[in-house]
Image: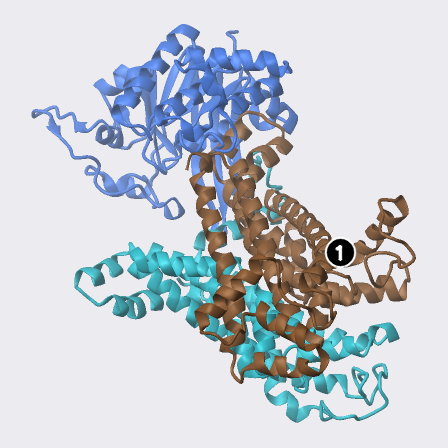
Chain colours: A cyan, B blue, C brown
Amino acid sequence: MTNTKIPRKAMVGLVILGVFFLMAIVGPLAAPYDPSAFVDVPLQPPSRAHLLGTTGQGQDVWSQTIAGARTSLLVGFAAGLVMTSVGAIVGAIAGTFGGLVDDALSLLTNVSLVIPGLPLAVVLAAYLPAGTKALLVVLVATGWAWNARVVRSQVLSLRNKDFVAAAIVTGESRLHIVFREILPNMTSVLASCFISATVYAIGAQVGLEFLGLGDMSVVTWGTNLYWASNDAALLLGAWWTLLPTGLSVALVGTALVLVSFSLDEITNPRLRAAAASARVLAARGIRPGASTPVVRDHA
Amino acid sequence: MPSAPLLSVEDLVVEYQTPSGPVRAVDAVSFVLERGEVLGLVGESGSGKSTVAQALARILGPPAIITGGRVLFEGNDVLAMTEDELRRFRWRKMSFVLQSAMNALSPVLTIGDQIIDVLVTHERTTTRAARERAAHLLELVGIDPARLASHPHELSGGMRQRVGIALALALDPPLVIMDEPTTALDVVVQHEVLSKIAELKEKLGLSVLFITHDMSIVSQFATRIGVLYAGRLVEMAPTRELFRAPRHPYTKGLLGSFVSIHGPRRRLAGIPGSPPDLRRLPAGCAFRARCAEATDRCATEAPVLRVIAEDHPTACHLVSP
Amino acid sequence: MRYLLRQLGLYVLAAWASLTLNFIVPRLAPGDPASAMFARYKGQLQPEALAALREAFGFTGGPLHEQYAAYLAHLFRGDLGVSVAYFPAKVTDVLAMGLGWTALLTGSSVVVAFALGSLLGVVAAWRRGSAFDATLPPLLVFLGAFPYFWLAMMLLYGFGFTLDALPLRHAYEDTLAPSLSFAFVASVAEHLLLPATSIVLASVGGWMLSMRSSMIGVLAEDYVTMAHAKGLSPLRIMFHYAARNALLPNVTGFGMALGFVLGGSLLTEIVFSYPGQGYLLVQAVRSQDYPLMQGIFLTITMAVLAANFLVDVLYVWLDPRTRGR
């Protein structure tokens, strides 16, 4: 492929992610206040002293948003990584080994997919000691199956490819084939899986913490929303205690989805060609869905 | 003045709008189809034969656009019709039998639904009358009318293709375009479908545009044959004339043998090489790279269609009248 | 029919798996939280209630398989123990209060979001590359990236609090008693509007995108070209030929997505104090009411599995090819 230009969608996504990473890494050093400390009169609207106002507990919202980025992104991306690994291993083994192994693992995957995630996550989180480790376990336990299914179907289509067939014929061990031949050849699929897993992890984490599960003393995007809701901030008109965190979650989610769209287009060149053709036609004012247009350029 | 021919295509140009620029899939194709005639269009995949067929009714989807020419049906230019005029024109004047029996019928609708809706749309009849007509159509192609309630997956490939033919005859159109109607079928079923088509052609006096990559099939029906290569018509002649005296090297290759004046006939395994990439057509003759007899002139100058013998135009530098 | 039987088998297995998880989790959790729970309840519950609770959870002191048998026996008798938060009400009675409201809220918003999203996806694919197709999907992706409950809070703030146009909380006016009167139904509808809208806003984009991509694939099929060639009206081609086929993969996805949307919908209930399972869930979490939490997990899982099976039946009805299999 000679066209190595990064698609515009991916560019937008990566820039947004970059800003949030920067916020998560160097932000806490630059934050004006201790995010947990009582620093001023509670529920002040945004002002020069407090760019995004103060919470019902008299904390600085801007400092809390920055601190939340660090914890929430860390947990989200870590959970995404573990979920992808678990899903990839289960899916790849099911797809490569076939037979009974596949039947059993596919059944496990499907059962796990139809059990609703949040109620199970609540039960798990309630019994596990509150903390980051427990949160990771809960997120992975409820979110790995989708990746396993995607990876398995991708492996099944790869299995018929020449290089895998060659490896099987030369008598390579099955595990060798899984980890050396198959998984390295589906990096873009794994990347998509990682992205959707991370989106799920961030969303589920925020949801669980909003419910009051987890360590409420740590500043995360989820606990920010929990406390805002607990302090009845909205009913007092303090929209600024909710807006920054919600926007942050949505921006990170959208950025990840944008990157994932671009990945899909790279994996599936026909998709990209069709999208580009649609743009070419649209640019010429040709409406799809009707009869083949007649355009006489040189008339 | 004689009445207009049934179908007259003049310098039709179809381009696919791709991100890397327009690709010309059909380049200045012209031909005439008279009433009662069966015209064969022959070419490899990618030669533009299906594109020509679908452009005639303007049912080519994006990213195709028609950039030039005229398509005169009974004297009216299809390329100048409005959407409403096109909808009334389609199927009533020109119907299709498409290549893949599998995919030409929607899998979730019954056979009956898919025949009846065309009748109801065009003839404004009652559903009941349409159902009777649909049953009659199935009988015409030798299928039990009870099959109206079946879904496509419940029928064999041959039956599906005969349903396709029944569907094409629904409005008794003057022209039926058959695009590889037997390609997806096995040989026995192929024969069965072809003889059905031949029978109906005689019985109903159809005009047919028959598109195929298989010379032997088209020879059974066609009164005349046009040969397409890389979106251009390279030779056209009455069937017997074409088989007796093919002029273009590509046609000779398609016919499976070169007729040598000096020696005995020798079989050819086919045409060496593969069809050219339409995105990067070479200068000169598009067939040059696969032509054993190409000269320097073929590399620089694209041959145009010239009438070599009576009713036998050919686009090749190597043949002279 | 074999297809439906296979799916049914999957759901039965999933049901058994969740019953068993429900049994195992309290026993596997580090630090023996179950004993801690019983110890904590000691002050609050009468000894008989505590004993009944132990029974229902199978903490009989016997070996594990006996505990499991006791647990299952109680479960099949419909005994999920007593709720701590709503003591002395039985968990099943507490659950029954909320089930209808959750079914109403989640059911109506999921159906609306699915129908609306699918419709928008059909139009976007049909008008591919148009301004509609270029602007709406990214916008809805952005909306869908907000947590459901956050959108709920913003709607609550905007329409309920600032504009004072719609009710802020509960499922109906406190002054009304549940009945089939017009006033009551109207009040239920009015209270449903904001929470349902927030769920629809958050989930419609997903349906739109998947319908759009499935539709784009279908539009390239021969039967759609045939429908064009037949001179049918664009609307008929779009819906009768293209969309009906494009809908099939989306229906399969519907079951999977249901559990996910339900999670968001439970959190939305909390924002509006909507008296469904989500509201009960937060009460359970706050008062560490494990029996209620586990009861909610079980009921919701069973409801989702049942809904999945209904979707499978619908799928068989929509796709004649599955009937023979």
Please, what secondary structure does the residue beneath circle 1 have?
A: helix
Where does the C terminus of chain B fall, quadrant-wise? top left
Q: Which residue has dot 1 on it?
A: C197
Residue shown at the point (59%, 41%) measured from the top left: A288
Q: Quadrant of residue C324?
A: top left
Q: In the rendered image, is residue A264 in sight? A: no
Q: Chain of mark 1?
A: C
Q: Nearer the viewer, residue B279 or A82?
A: A82
- Residue C52 image point, x, y percent: 63, 70
> Viewed as shown, does residue B47 lie left or right of C268?
left
Q: In the rendered image, is residue C241 in sight? A: yes
Q: Quadrant of residue A298?
A: top right
> Viewed as shown, does residue A240 lie left or right of A166?
right
- Residue A163 image point, x, y percent: 25, 61
- Residue A283 image point, x, y percent: 61, 49
In the rendered view, tell whether residue A43 sits above or below residue C23. Answer: below
Q: Nearer the viewer, residue C304 or C36?
A: C36
Q: Quadrant of residue B83?
A: top right
- Which amino acid is tagged 1? Thr
Q: Nearer the viewer, residue C103 or C314?
A: C103
Residue shown at the point (62%, 51%) measured from the top left: C208
How would you rate the neighbour count of disc 1 (Cα within 10 Å): few for under 14, some for 14-19, many for 20 or more? Answer: some
- Residue C282 image point, x, y percent: 71, 71
